[in-house]
Image (cartoon, rainbow, N blue to C red):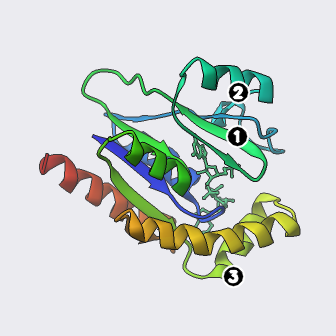
Amino acid sequence: MLIVVSGPGGVGKGTIAEILVEKHANLWLSKSWTTRPQREGEEEESYVFVTHEEFKKAIDEDVFLEWAEFHNNFYGTPWPNPPEDFDVLLEIDVQGAKAVTERGLDFLMIFVDAPTLEDQAERLRGRGDSEKEIERRIREGERERNDARDLGAIVVVNDDLDRAVSEISSIIMSNRSGE
Ligand code: ADP
Ligand code: 5GP
């Protein structure tokens, strides 16, 4: 099964994805490539950090299942290569989810959102994003919410982290048994 976790910047989807792979032994988290510089305090393992040239070369070599440009940087998901019987988890933006649909792949889409725009802004601020960046991510969230609805995403509000993770775990398990 392919699972896509998406949502506006700062709602906590990266945090949730990491907890999900710790909780579920047979869930494999895809590591994306990005041309974005590593943030201060961000783990080295969060992404494969590459130059624009390296990213363009990888596009030409068909390394990616999908890729998208986001805030002047490129992000891409390499073709997944999980161990046998593992479900694949992608934490990507809504444009990326659309591109996966265009590849003809079926997936479970979960759209994580913050309880309010103020909470989203506060989380971005807490992570060290600039005010300009926060404004942009909030603005883009509106479009992402509409696109996610069109893609049939299941919306999960990340109010309390443990509760949101439990809700997503239940959704994953019920979709697994329904396969
Ligand atoms: P995203 O991947 O959606 O951009 P992150 O996972 O980087 O977001 O989370 C943004 C910030 O919000 C981080 O500092 C994270 O610790 C915090 N955060 C995540 N979930 C919650 C929550 N339920 N309540 C409060 N803060 C949260
Ligand atoms: P950030 O810079 O905050 O880590 O990520 C910015 C946005 O890019 C987020 O919405 C995140 O989900 C998305 N993203 C991360 N990896 C990928 C990817 O491989 N493909 C796509 N399309 N989006 C990604």
SS category of the residue bearing label 3: helix
- Residue at image location 46% in from the left, 43% down from the top: 90
Q: Residues within 10 Å of mark 2 (few under 14, many from 20)?
A: many
Spot occupied by residue 139 in the image (x, y as percentages of width and height): 70, 74
Residue located beneath label 1 in the image: 74
Instruction: Name the mark nearer the viewer: 3 or 1.
Output: 1
Residue 10 visible in the picture: yes
Q: Amino acid at mark 3?
A: Glu
Q: Secondary structure at mark 2?
A: helix
- In the picture provided, is 176 more to the left or to the right than 83? left
Q: CA distance from mark 3 to mark 1?
A: 27 Å
Q: Earlier in the sequence, mark 2 or mark 1?
A: 2
In what quadrant of the picture does the C terminus appear? top left
- Alpha carbons under labels 2 and 1: distance apart: 7 Å
Q: Nearer the viewer, residue 41 or 114?
A: 114
Ligand 1 located in image quadrant: bottom right
Q: Which residue is mark 3?
A: 118
Q: Which residue is mark 2?
A: 55
Q: Residue at x 62, y 70 (%)?
A: 141
Return the disc, 2 or 3, that comes first in the chain's sequence.
2
